[in-house]
Image (cartoon, grey):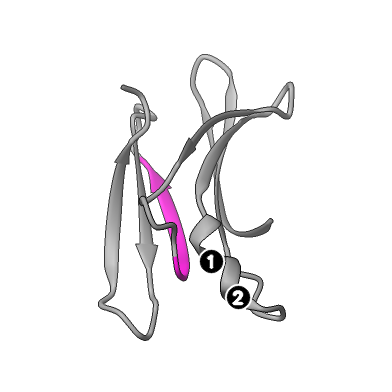
Amino acid sequence: MNVISSCLRLFAGKQLFLVNGPDLWQNSQSVSSDHGLVLDIESGLPMTLWGPDKGFRLPHDLAVSPDGKYVYVSEIDLSAPKRVYKFNIRN
């Protein structure tokens, strides 16, 4: 995994929000598997996976709402319109 951005938030426990992207030094054919995840800091285990259905192309940065319910990810793919995704990760 090539981590593009991360954000640490303290809620019920310590959680690390991550978004990964393609390894620009390798064949980037696997970009469709790129996603975001929430890791439990204490156990090191993933708690939640999230992302667009077709995966990220070139995610740039992420932000988390103060309550930890929403994650925002900006994407800067040069071959597509720039966009900001909003994910509800606490359904």
Q: Quadrant of residue 40?
A: top right
Kindly indicate whether the residue at mark 2 contacts the one at mark 1 (C-beta within 8 angstroms): yes
Q: Is residue 81 magenta?
A: no
Residue at mark 2: 28
Q: Residue at x 38, y 67 (%)?
A: 75
The amino acid type of the residue labelled 1 equals Val
Q: Residue at x 73, y 22 (%)?
A: 42
Query: In terms of depth relative to the viewer, which is nearer, 40 or 27?
Result: 27
Q: Residue at x 71, y 78 (%)?
A: 26
The x, y position of residue 35, in whole percent, is: 50, 51
| First to last magenta residue range | 57-64
When the figure is inspected, residue 37 is found, relative to residue 46, above or below; the finding is below
The x, y position of residue 6, in whole percent, is: 56, 50
In what element is the residue under mark 1? Answer: helix
The x, y position of residue 48, in whole percent, is: 51, 30
Residue at mark 1: 31
